[in-house]
Amino acid sequence: MDHISLIKCKVSFLQQDSKTYENWKWFLNNLKKALLSERRTVFISDRAKGLKEAVPEIFPMDHHGYCLRHIKANFMTEAAARYRKALKDSMVKTLNKVAFALNESEYVVALTEMERKSPEAKDWILRNDVEHWANTQFPRERYGQMYSNLA
């Protein structure tokens, strides 16, 4: 019988002068050497500058998920900032529905709900790499891991 095990580990903390592509590339190359495994990995991060580009380069067969807490924070400042609090809160709940939808039908219903609230907010969702943070669009199982406390 095949077993799928979820291994969640906090790899390390990296002190670096700046979060650049080159620094992330160096770190990820060293991480790859340390992993010593062909096991597929799902990375969850905050979409940091340089990291977004370095993960697929260094780990081309693995997947890069984005931390939903950071997606929500960006959504609040970029897409929902101009709305009154009640609507903003409602839009965040709908964003959660988009992220946590368990099937394509639920995903489409949530996107339609967002479009009724704000067509611009729906467009923001579609422009912001939904395939990296919405369950139904992510190409691999996330095992319920939508957030990263480290990110």
Image (tube, helix red, strand yellow):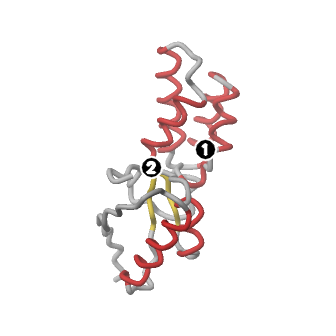
Disc nearest the viewer among 1 and 2: 2
Pick whichever, 88 or 49, lies toward us: 49
Tell me which amino acid carries mark 1.
Ser
Residue at coordinates 53% horizontally, 13% vertically from top-left? 84
Quarter the N terminus occupies: bottom left
The disc, 1 or 2, on the residue closer to the chain's N-terminal end is 2
Circle 1 — which element?
A: helix
Query: How far from the left and from the top, in percent, is residue 45?
Result: 45, 55
Query: How far from the left and from the top, in percent, is residue 85?
Result: 48, 15
Q: Which residue is mark 1?
A: 105
Rendered position, 36 above or below 113 = below
Badge 1: few (under 14), some or many (20 or more) residues near its Cα, within 10 Å?
A: few
Residue at coordinates 52% horizontally, 35% vertically from top-left? 95
The residues tagged by marks 1 and 2 sit, at their Cα atoms, a distance apart of 23 Å
Q: Which residue is mark 2?
A: 67
Query: How far from the left and from the top, in percent, is residue 94?
Result: 52, 31
Badge 2: few (under 14), some or many (20 or more) residues near its Cα, within 10 Å?
A: many
On the picture, is 12 further left or further right than 114? left
Residue at coordinates 66% horizontally, 33% vertically from top-left? 122
Label ID, residue 14: none
